[in-house]
Amino acid sequence: MDRKEEALKLLDANWTGRFTKPSPNLYPHQWNWDAGFIALGNAQHDLSRVITEYRSLFAGQWSNGLLPHIVFGPPTGHYFPEQDFWQSDRSTFSPKNVQTSGITQPPVHGFILKRIYDKHSEDSDFIAFLKEIFPKLVKLHEYYYRDRNPLRNGLITIRHPWESGTDNSPIWDEALSAMQIDKDALPDFKRKDLQNPKAAGHRPTHEDYDRYVYLVDLFRRLDYDEEKINEQCPFQIVDPLFNAILTWSNEAIITLGDILQMDYGELIYWNEQTIYSMNELLWDEQAGIYHAWDAVESKKIEVHTHSGLMPMIGGIPDVDQVEQMIRRMTGPNFKNDETYYLPSYNLSQSDIDHEKYWRGPIWISTNWLIIQGLNRYGFDELADEVFQDTIELIHQFGFYEYFDPRRNVRNNGYGTNQFSWSASLYLDMLN
Ligand code: DGY
């Protein structure tokens, strides 16, 4: 069987009839940004599955617009935290017939649906579906600008590392370690992710999980009240990757709105604010990369990861800035003769861990994003180099969750295998 057939088979195997599991064991429910990336693969062969997947995800949308990071299927007992732990029915906004988490994830859906539309603009069922989902997309983006925009400058904050999608990125280290946790006051919990033998050694630490749980417990104690969370949450960070994804999706929603002749409110105004503020507050001219911002401490987080290169996708930097970013990306911090593109963390940092989740390994999703960013600015040769590396990783090792950036490592795939977005983005890239 060739890899393309394997990818299709994998997506079939992880399909539940309502949504696609990111992987059979480690992630048994529907995840927000995974659902978007997975839709791109399914769009190659089964548009009705894309529509069902998206209807399931948006059935979990809260009435204030928040699109949760997990929409749960039936409890499995194999994942922590499941619906019982989140207690999202404490919120007046959560849907009462669908079980969800109470935090969000990067809003990829605008640009993903636009990409699918570009290939299927004649499909009347898909257009009807787009018209159905469009107001929900706008409501999601309005939620960010209303409730996650503390400085009113268009920079959106995340309030939990899980909201970033890059759970244990070194960007969060300082803010997490500054959190004073009374372990005795934490609710009882038992991690399930360590039961997966292949992934166990690469997962976040127990100290990380204490903080993850502390934050969830805080949110549910506050009944998911946005104002109270904004006042009391010790972790509020502006992440370049999250904001770049938001910006690209804003742009796509504006374009789709014009095509469909549907209302997108104040989005043009807010998008300009985000772009302006990212360049004002997050651009590091000397380093040629964007950094994150700690909105609680009002200070830069000068930890450079691949997140700082992502603003290209949203057209945020000008061409001079992109040239500087490319020098950074192709230089020793992110590339050398012995490595593949694009490690999630700076190769020359002493605390890089090539095997550990978001602290060094390569991810297919972020490689896919950087390819789109480079193409946007016409750096097609470099985009092709990243593309070739990405395809080589999959051809050699399979559909792992993440990969070692070092070329001389033999068993290079880490985390869970049978990982849906690795398969679906591979299918998208081949087309
Ligand atoms: C996990 O459980 O590892 C997820 O990334 C949280 O969303």
Image (cartoon, grey):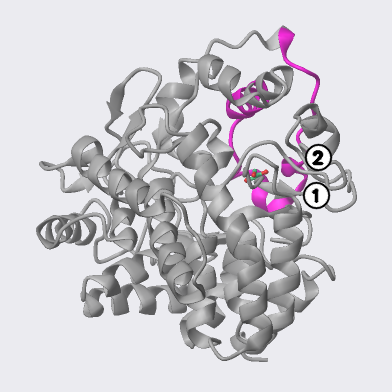
Q: Is residue 344 left or right of residue 202?
A: left
Q: Position of residue 25 (x, y in %)?
A: 78, 56
Q: Secondary structure at mark 1?
A: loop
The residue tagged 2 is 82
Q: Are marks 2 and 1 in contact (CB under 8 Å)?
A: yes
Q: Residue at x 32, y 35 (%)?
A: 153
Q: In the rendered image, which quarter is residue 62 located in?
A: top right
Q: In the rendered image, which quarter is residue 35 located in?
A: bottom right
Residue type indicated by callout 2: Glu
Q: Is residue 276 above or below residue 253?
A: above
Q: Residue at x 84, y 53 (%)?
A: 73
CA–CA distance in space, label 2 to label 1: 7 Å
The residue tagged 1 is 72
Q: Secondary structure at mark 2?
A: loop
Examine the structure image and report whether residue 54 is included in the region drawn in magenta: no
Quadrant containing the N terminus is bottom right
Q: Please give the label number shown on residue 239.
A: none
Examine the structure image and report whether residue 194 is included in the region drawn in magenta: yes
Mark 1 Cβ inside 8 Å of ligand 1: no
Name the residue nearer the viewer: 164 or 388. Answer: 164
Name the residue nearer the viewer: 220 or 331. Answer: 220
Q: Is residue 304 left or right of residue 280?
A: right
Q: Which residues are magenta?
A: 185-214
Q: Is residue 257 above or below residue 147?
A: below
Q: Residue at x 62, y 44 (%)?
A: 65
Q: Position of residue 10 (x, y in %)?
A: 72, 76
Q: Is residue 138 in sight in this rendering?
A: yes
Q: Position of residue 348 (x, y in %)?
A: 26, 45
